[in-house]
Image (tube, rainbow, N blue to C red):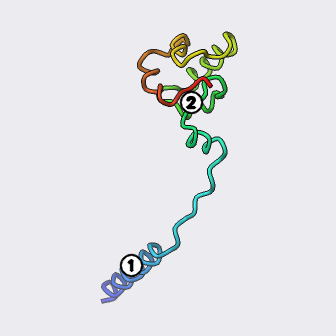
Amino acid sequence: MHKRYFSSLLVAVLATAALSASAAEPVKTPPATPEAVQVEVVGKINLNAADVATLKRELNGIGEVKAKAIVEYREANGPFASVEELLEVKGIGQATLEKNRDKLSVN
């Protein structure tokens, strides 16, 4: 008898908790950082201005090593003249360029 009563009481408490949680005010997200807003508004990553962290975070198939290679190439050879020049960076092939072409600019 006590076991059944305890189980019923537990179900009632959990149901109440679930209802109050679903009725709670939604969690507000903090405003986006200026960098995130710029990426969303502009929609393009500038190969001549982006740092390693931005390249790594925003581009598909680009990790730490390739992002550093892009920045090192830019520092050694000057600004990128075109998005296609990205193919000159060691480790960047046509497939990686095509995955990211719409995200890239040199302006």
> Does 88 sit left or right of 48 as displayed?
left
* x and y percentages locating residue 14 in the rendered image: 41, 77
* Quarter of the image where the N terminus is located: bottom left
The quadrant in which residue 34 appears is: top right
> Does 53 sit left or right of 88 as displayed?
right
Q: Which amino acid does label 2 sit on?
A: Lys
Q: Is mark 1 on a helix, strand or loop?
A: helix
Q: In this view, does 88 lie above or below 12?
A: above
* x and y percentages locating residue 29 in the rendered image: 58, 58
Q: CA–CA distance between discs 2 and 1?
A: 44 Å
* Quarter of the image where the C terminus is located: top right
Q: Circle 1 sits on which residue?
A: 15
**How crowded is the residue under tag 2: few (<14 C-alpha within 10 Å), some, or many (20+)?**
some
> Does 90 sit left or right of 107 as displayed?
left
Q: Is residue 45 above or below residue 14?
A: above
What numbered label is drawn on residue 2? none
- Is 26 or 34 nearer to us in this picture? 34
Q: Which of marks 2 and 1 is nearer the N terminus?
A: 1
Q: Circle 2 sits on which residue?
A: 56
- Is 81 or 1 nearer to us in this picture? 81
- Is 86 or 92 nearer to us in this picture? 86
Identified at 52% across, 68% down, the residue is 26
